[in-house]
Amino acid sequence: MRQLDLVVIVVYLIGIAWIGLRKAGKQKSAKDYFVGEGHMPWWTVSFSVVATETSVLTVISVPGGAYSGQGFGNVELALGYVIGRVVVATVLIPLYKRGGFVSAYQYLGDRFGLKLQGLASVTFVFTRLLAEGVRLFASAIPIKLLLDEFGVHASYRVIIIVLTLITVVYTYLGGIKAVIWTDAIQMGLYLGGAILAVAVLSAHVGGAGYARAWDAGRFTLFDTDFNLAHVLTSPFALPTAIVGGAIFAMASHGSDQLIVQRVLATRTLREGQKAMIASGVFVVIQFAAFSLVGALLWSYNQGRSFSELGLSSSDNLYPEFILNGLPVVVSGLLVAGILGAAMGSLSSALNSMSNSTVADIIHSFFRSAPSEESLLRLARWTTLVWATLMAVFACAFSTSTGNVYLTGLTIAGYTYGALLGAFLLGRLVTRANEADSVVAFLVTIGVMTYIVRVVKIDVTTDGTTVSQAIAAQWLVPIGVVITLVVGGVLSLFHRAPTAGDGSADGAEPGTGPDQLTATAGRN
């Protein structure tokens, strides 16, 4: 009967590509390809933001984390994310929408110059390659389990390549419109799958199962251990989750083109702000749903360890239940939901990386504005290039072990502080010029690389002392402080730029409604 699961999955893959292409229509310009000419409804953009940031990392890792003792810590973290999004909606989105940008980094080009714009874009695309490599590998985990059920032992690499090929079809042809509409559908599918899993598990464990999970701390929301070492190393300590999570969200949703691009596709500034804030509310809901799955699985499995269950890591918990604990067809729907999360984040990454490559990197080399046809061809070709590289990087993670969700956060810690710090430097330090910003950016990347890879803090638990890395949420504020301090100190060694020289922050950013074309003429 497992063949019915495969039928469901195949129908889903064909259907989602068809729907994406139908909704996309035919692109007439690069701006249409990247931001849909700014005509997308706010609610679809909000769903797309959630689907983009969720991916398989959340779908398979959060239930495993809740099972192993994190409780509802991810919900606590999401509350910090909501605060950060409110700040982004208030401070940064007006900057982008009024400037008519198609890329967040065009603000840095207006404020500091093309060198920092290009540097920020290069940093973004390479960070995204690493982060999406982790995500794409994670998506192969449940697919491999399903194929093993049929005796088909495909490698992770084969699964990654096939998944990339399917996703790139509608991304290449449909642009951002196809990405946003398919994201909205895929979010409904994987969130609906979680709700369905909760219903099935609730029927199995009953009220007594909820009580056992509650008594075992699987519903714990706030981590109130304020020991300094714990706060600095645990991603779920209350100050880390709320304060660090808020600043992390400011970076991920205010300075990462992956998310900003979706908001730029809305019709108006107000709709962009609504999409951003609403996405935070939806993230809280979905974190609660996936955490509840993990808590109920703990009761369902009577608290047995992962090794006792025959699982190699926490990331195998939810996929294993989908395949062996649910009826045929239902399990197929939930695997399709996981595929939806994988394809949503992958298609979003490919389109945003293509956007940043064309708008921020390649476009800077043109002395005169290229034709719209040339820009559209470039957009599609760079989508193919990044898709190929993405698959290569994902294959490199195929020997990775551990919680892939936290691995993804740590990768972002290398660069998010420098990216957000560059934006804040432009807004807060009016004396800072291009040289200050570039040096501060590079120094921050170097220092953060050292902190992520070398710096450890001794944490004592139950009489045992172990060295742990700084929590991923604190990496962003540390990076921001370094950027502001270095850039601010350097700005004291030269005269303050005047409003007329193109560097002062007092000037209104942007030079017109289509920055993709307008910025070319400045070079």
Image (cartoon, rainbow, N blue to C red):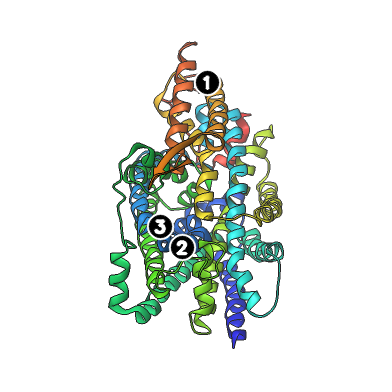
Q: Nearer the viewer, mark 1 or mark 3?
A: 1
**Which kind of residue does numbered mark 1 sit on?**
Asp
Q: Which residue is mark 2?
A: 64
Marks 1 and 3, how far apart at CA: 37 Å
Q: Above or below — where is 115 with respect to 401? A: above
Identify which residue is drawn at 34% across, 57% down: 281
Q: Earlier in the sequence, mark 2 or mark 1?
A: 2
Q: On residue 211, which mark appears?
A: none
Asked whether, in this view, residue 51 is left or right of residue 387, the answer is: left
- Taking the image as shown, residue 210 lies to the left or right of residue 1, namely left
For label 3, the residue is 42
Query: Mark 1 or mark 3: which comes first in sequence?
Result: 3
Evaluate if marks 1 and 3 touch, with contact meaning CB atoms under 8 Å apart. no
- Front residue of 118 and 73: 73
Q: CA distance from mark 2 to mark 1?
A: 44 Å
Which circle, 2 or 3, is nearer the viewer? 2
Residue 44: where, in percent of width, then height? Answer: 44, 61
SS at badge 2: helix
Task: Examine the rendering and report whether any part of residue 505 can be seen.
Answer: yes
On the image, the x and y values in percent for residue 151 come to: 69, 79
Q: Residues within 10 Å of mark 1 (few under 14, many from 20)?
A: many
Give the amino acid type for the residue marked by disc 3 in the picture: Trp
- Return the mark for residue 436: 1
